[in-house]
Amino acid sequence: MDDRKTTYRITDLQDSERPRERLAALGAGSLSTAELLAILLRVGVAGENAVQVGQRLLKEFGSITGLYRAPFGEVCNQRGVGQAKAAQIKAAIELGNRMTMEKSTSRPVINSPEDAAALVRFEMSLLEQEELRSLLLDTRNRVIASQIIYRGSLNSSHIRVGELFRDAIRISAAALIVVHNHPSGDPTPSPEDIAVTRAIIQAGNLLDVKVLDHLIIGNGQFVSLKERGLGFQ
């Protein structure tokens, strides 16, 4: 006798437990990541409904970030996925990424480390290598430009601090915020991160461009070196 679970369609769930109905009633923000994936998957497989397939994908790849980073073919080969569903998942995550970048073009005002992190956290948490960026601000702390300075391991002997301030001086930015990511997902500052921060602050003092903060982006979290008093007097 086949003892596999027989519940493998969302329609087998009660109305109050179905992701689409819950989204319509409560909003997308009330759904778990697995439930959002279930809406994209639509149906499950024998023994698993779509929510359970979503949970399995998150476990297999570690997180939604891991699912985004995974090669397309690897996602396709997961039981219950295939090319069409893998494409839908990849496209949905990329749309979220582009929405974040679109918001960052509207000259937002930075009043806190959280404001700055919100502009880049989604995109930079997905990067597979370290990337150093700067957010250039005017006298009202409005973002007037964002630039990628460096890709690769963050090392003070490799980074040319002058490049960090070149565009800031060219467009007469009053201040900047430095941001880089840790692909490991752990945003804990390293001694090298602190040394780089000190060097950047010293250069900013000489060039009359205030360095407001240095943020490190991890997987769904960030650290403000300014808040922790690391590299800042």
Image: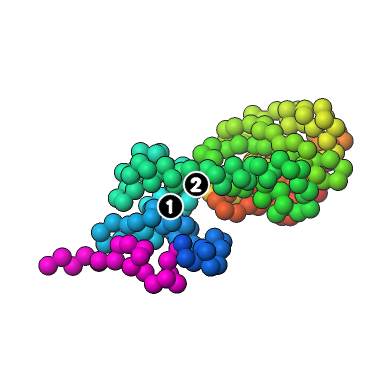
Q: Is residue 167 magenta?
A: no
Quadrant of the rendered image containing residue 143: top right
Could you say where residue 121 lies in the image, as x and y percent from the top left? 62, 48
Residue 17, image quadrant: bottom left
150 vs 32, left or right, is: right
Q: Earlier in the sequence, mark 1 or mark 2?
A: 1
Farthest left residue?
Answer: 1
Q: Is label 2 in a helix, a strand or a loop?
A: helix
Residue 167 x, y percent position in the rendering = 77, 29
Q: Is residue 116 left or right of residue 16?
A: right
User: Which residues are the magenta region?
Assistant: 1-19
What's the amino acid at mark 1? Answer: Leu
How many residues crowd mark 2 within 10 Å: few (<14), some (14–19), many (20+)?
some
Are the residues flagged by discs 1 and 2 in contact, CB closer than 8 Å? Answer: yes
**In the image, what residue occupies the spot 39% across and 72% down?**
14
Q: Which residue is mark 1?
A: 40
What is the number of the mark on residue 67? Answer: none
Q: Which mark is residue 92?
A: 2
